[in-house]
Image (cartoon, rainbow, N blue to C red):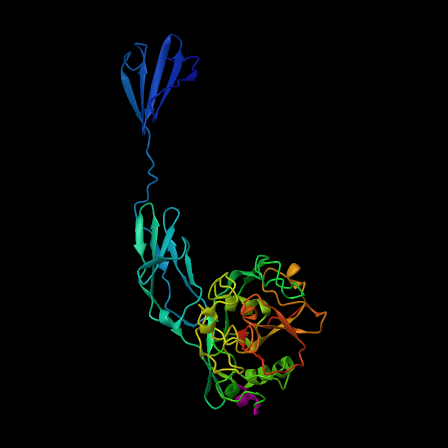
Amino acid sequence: MMIQHYRPLFRKGCAPGLSRMMALSGPALLICVAAGGSLACTSTSPHLYGGGATAPITTPTTSTTPTTDPAITTAPMTTTVTAGQSATFTVAATGATTLHYQWQDNGVNVGTDAPTYTLALPKPGNSGDSVTVTVTDVAGSVTSSASKLTVNPLVVTLPGNLPLDLTAIAAGTFTMGAPDSDPDANANTNHDEGPQHQVTISENFYIGTYLVTQAQWSQIMGSNPSYFSGPQRPVEQVSYTDITAATTGFLALLNQNATASPALPPGYVFRLPTEAEWEYACRAGTTTRFYWGDFPDTDPTINAYAWYSGDAGGTTHIVGGLLPNAWGLYDMAGNVYEWCQDWYDPGYYSASPLTDPVGPSTSPYSARVIRGGTWPAGSFICRPAYRGNILPSAADSGYGFRVVLAPPRLPPPA
């Protein structure tokens, strides 16, 4: 019998996974139901499939479920880095569907769901770490062989085999300046400690664990200008110009004569810290008035951290003699002021870039920034937010510095 006037009619209300089709053929009705990969048809006509009989029509079924586990095509490689320089591990893998990644460092889950894992600030204590990654898709998972991490300490030596200790600081973001609620924030007539603002330091850098000592200065410069004599005391009576002169300054000679093992990271030089780098390192992750807590100026806790007018006894002291901040830096408060690279402008914070600020192109006072407090000054000057300013040619028994090892950061042109 020839089917005429064929019209598909779709009926709603079928159970999940079923679809029903009705086709009219004259007085006959052909009803087909699809379930999974099969199609069964029933006719109301005695001439079609025997009248009421069901004739299966089989359609091929295509499986979308992967049948094999993912495979790692390139495993993470054993990596050697210098302490303070980031270590990155990478894996390449194939799979039937979207891949997911779980990294582990010594068995501890780390990183993100990505084919790379970066340890931002590896330290010598990370040497020997075992890094693996498990790659997963809907079919299963596979774990890489272990990749070993070797971290070599950065050792800097001056002539005469004199060490220069450096601490690696990770890139990050912090709040710079003091809030208006700080009773000392507006004590300075320049009102220069605000507004508070977020600053990002975009690259890892190294900073002196200690203030530059008289022994280190003498080894590089051949003389000692300090008023308070002692090889392990901070060098003082040094001006900004003494430190930064292009060919005869301490930094120029340090860059020429210091040796490093392993070699210094490419593009890194010894220089003064920017004001932002200095405060970031001083705060060491804290947001309090002092880096040891939210204390009033008269609280005696300061005596464990800083040499200032209340405990210095009218003199400088051996570097590293008091407690460090949370990142292991000594004398970030007190002993001697620390020269920074930036020109000083009391209104700079209102226009400062939010990433790697380097200070203004000039100073209305022709002055450079100093930070950190000093032996003859009061306790409030030991706050991380305090900003001082001194003519670059000035030298005093209260002025010293520490070095930074980092890419150059140059101020904008005047």
In this rendering, is residue 58 above or below 44? below
Q: Position of residue 170 (x, y in %)?
A: 48, 66
Q: Residue at x 30, y 9 (%)?
A: 46
Does 136 sit left or right of 289 as displayed?
left
Across the whole image, how many numbered discs are drawn on residues?
0
Q: Residue at x 68, y 63 (%)?
A: 347
Does 372 sit left or right of 122 as displayed?
right
Q: Which residues are magenta?
A: 217-223
Q: Position of residue 22 (x, y in %)?
A: 38, 16
Q: Residue at x 45, y 89 (%)?
A: 161
> Predominant secondary structure in magenta?
helix
Which image quarter is the N terminus in?
Answer: top left
Q: Quadrant of residue 90?
A: bottom left
Task: Give the residue furthest to the top.
Answer: 27
Q: Quadrant of residue 126?
A: bottom left
Which image quarter is the C terminus in?
Answer: bottom right
Q: Nearer the viewer, residue 272 or 265?
A: 272
Q: Residue at x 33, y 41 (%)?
A: 65
Q: Position of residue 407 (x, y in %)?
A: 56, 72
Q: Position of residue 379 (x, y in %)?
A: 54, 70
Q: Quadrant of residue 336?
A: bottom right
Q: Nearer the viewer, residue 278 or 324?
A: 324
Residue 115 lies in the magenta stretch: no
In this rendering, is residue 257 above or below 176? below
Q: Is residue 85 visible?
A: no
Does 107 sit left or right of 269 as displayed?
left
Q: Is residue 196 visible?
A: yes
